[in-house]
Image: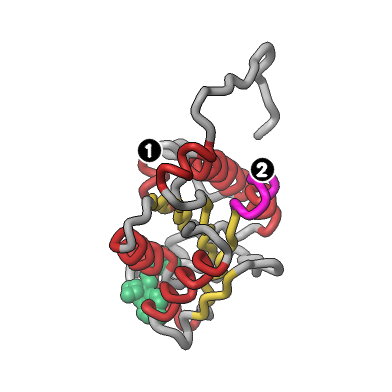
Amino acid sequence: MNESKSTNITWHEGQVSRTDREKMLAQRGCTIWLTGLSGSGKSTIAVAAEKVLNEMGRLTYILDGDNIRHGLNSNLGFSPDDRTENIRRIGEVSKLFTDAGLIVFSSFISPYRADRDAVREIMGEGDFVEAWVQATVETCEGRDVKGLYKKARAGEIPEFTGISAPYEEPNKAELLLDTNTQTVDESVAQIVEYLKTNGYLG
Ligand code: ADP
């Protein structure tokens, strides 16, 4: 689905570079890619981390599953091919926002390892920070914030990750956020510490 159909196109360089933008922002752009089951805590952690970073004077942006499916990806469903295309497009948007110098939180189940690796592949070294938001199906089902697990168990939602569709666990995530055992604040602190230690915050 992602083969290029465009020919005779060239990339136009501007006169303002990513480095110029990053200097202005006093930060290094990157994408924190939050992957994990529905209800594992991706959105909650992204929102809380963004608030903390904003208070530190950092420019951030959240890309979130449901929001993107309302607009950019409204023509995609949950079949394997559509999930792949969903992640491919979000990867490209993440790449652009990262190039703009932002600290992007991309919060998507993104259950297929190959899809996540493909995003890592298109981004520069250090631009893609994979954060596995880890929680067991039991934990997520116990929370069931949106009532989706109940529906999935009743067979009302086909291809539901963790129930009737697979989740392929990351094997090279830069961050492991275990929400079975740690609080939201602890996960946020872990992310901020990672950004500080690795030079993203200037
Ligand atoms: P996702 O974006 O992964 O689908 P959400 O963030 O929407 O998950 O939902 C996670 C739910 O779990 C929220 O209601 C949140 O308050 C709750 N929760 C309980 N404990 C934690 C924790 N330690 N980390 C993150 N979320 C938690």
The magenta region covers 121-127
Can residue 82 be seen at all in this image of the molecule? no
Q: Is residue 109 above or below residue 16?
A: below
Can residue 195 be seen at all in this image of the molecule? yes
Q: Is residue 33 above or below residue 148?
A: above
Q: CA distance from mark 2 to mark 1?
A: 23 Å
Q: Is residue 180 left or right of residue 147?
A: right
Q: Position of residue 30 (x, y in %)?
A: 53, 52
Q: Position of residue 201 (x, y in %)?
A: 47, 59
- Give me the disc on residue 71: 1
Q: Is residue 129 above or below residue 184?
A: above
Decide if ligand 1 comes within 8 Å of the CB at mark 1: no
Q: Quadrant of ligand 1?
A: bottom left
- Give me the disc on residue 178: none
What secondary structure is found at the residue carrying circle 2?
A: helix
Q: Is residue 22 left or right of residue 11?
A: left
Q: Position of residue 196 (x, y in %)?
A: 50, 67
Crowd band around label 1 with a 10 angstrom C-alpha radius: few (<14), some (14–19), many (20+) = few
Closer to the eye: label 2 or 1 = 2
